[in-house]
Amino acid sequence: MNPEQVLKWLESVYQRLPVGRCDGCRDCASRCAGDVPMLSTEYQAIRQYLADEGQRIPPPPRRLSTQMMARCRFLDQYSRWCAIYPVRPLICRLFGLVEWLPCPIRKQKVVVAEGWKLMRQYAELGPRPFTHWHEQAPQPSQMVRENTGI
Ligand code: SF4
Ligand code: SF4
């Protein structure tokens, strides 16, 4: 699939996923940990969203211990809210909706019966952790240099 087709596929998948009982709920924020995997298209959407909102990309939080994963860099540790909620990647949208990411408070029901099939298709598109894409992307200072030829 070319990037345009990936975007269309993602949009159609996102539209099919109900938010339902998750809307406004933060009770599984403790699962928001690690370097979230995503497609390059999703990385670009996050970057654009933060730029439009006038926000910087948060730095990765430090791990509290070698046994525990650090929280996701987009989780606000005080409000427990996702800073990129409208553009969160697919894996985050599946919380509570698939059998391997069940709702911890049993409020949301498993509704994506073919979750594994969906993830196989997704895996073929090459998801990588956020940091992977970020390290490859031109950084703002680099972009200024490229645009001005300095
Ligand atoms: S999966 Fe459950 S705990 Fe998580 S946001 Fe949805 S309703 Fe809340
Ligand atoms: S991107 Fe948002 S929803 Fe996904 S793990 Fe991070 S804080 Fe949670």
Image: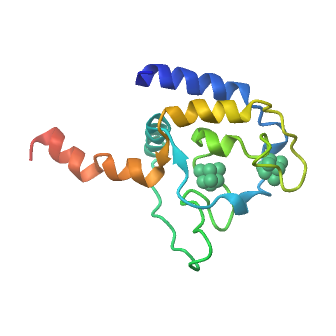
**Can you name the residue that lies furthest to the left here?**
150
The residue lying at 80 percent from left, 31 percent from top is 113
* Above or below, comparing residue 131 to residue 46 in the picture: below
* Above or below, comparing residue 63 to residue 73 in the picture: below
The residue lying at 76 percent from left, 47 percent from top is 100
Which residue is more in the foreground, 4 or 22? 4
The residue lying at 58 percent from left, 47 percent from top is 84
Task: State the quadrant of the N terminus.
Answer: top left
**Can you name the residue that lies furthest to the right here?**
106
* Above or below, comparing residue 28 to residue 38 in the picture: below
**Where is residue 74 drawn, in percent x and y?**
56, 56
**Where is residue 144 drawn, in percent x and y?**
20, 46
State which quadrant residue 78 falls in.
bottom right
Q: Is residue 39 left or right of residue 11?
A: left
Q: Can residue 56 be seen from the camera position used here?
A: no
Instruction: Tell me which colouring the rendered structure shows.
Output: rainbow
